Amino acid sequence: MLNKLLRLFRSHWAVENSLHWVLDVTLREEDSRVRKDHAPENMAMVRHIILNELQNTKKKFKDMSIRRLQKKAGRGYSTLDMILMAAL
């Protein structure tokens, strides 16, 4: 019973740590200077939405990393439009 709970606990934190690693590496979450009032929570929500949309669009670009897809969206409107349309 205890071993089962420990495995469950560790698997939960593995997912959490993986999510935060992706947010930090891809969206540079830890470099954020937003500190006042509710802005940090609001920006965290925006980052999660952005990450979800990038992951949804990545299904069409299987050979491209999320970071590379993000950079490609910043360079041209066609990829950015595709990411934004995936949200609708």
Image (tube, rainbow, N blue to C red):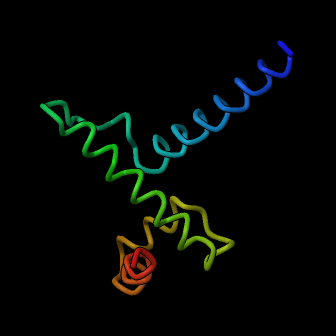
Q: Taking 87 as reference, is 34 above or below it?
A: above
- Say whether residue 5 is left or right of residue 13: right
Residue 65: image x %, image y %? 60, 62
Q: Taking 88 as reference, is 14 above or below it?
A: above
Quarter of the image where the C terminus is located: bottom left
* Count of marks placed on residues: 0
Residue 33 or 2: which is nearer the viewer?
2
Residue farthest top in this picture: 2
Q: Residue at x 68, y 73 (%)?
A: 62
Residue 68: image x %, image y %? 52, 64
Quarter of the image where the N terminus is located: top right
Residue farthest bottom in this picture: 78
Residue 52 or 74: which is nearer the viewer?
52
Residue 55 or 69: which is nearer the viewer?
55
- Say whether residue 75 is left or right of residue 9: left
Residue 85: image x %, image y %? 40, 82
Residue 25: image x %, image y %? 49, 44
Q: Residue at x 70, y 24 (%)?
A: 9
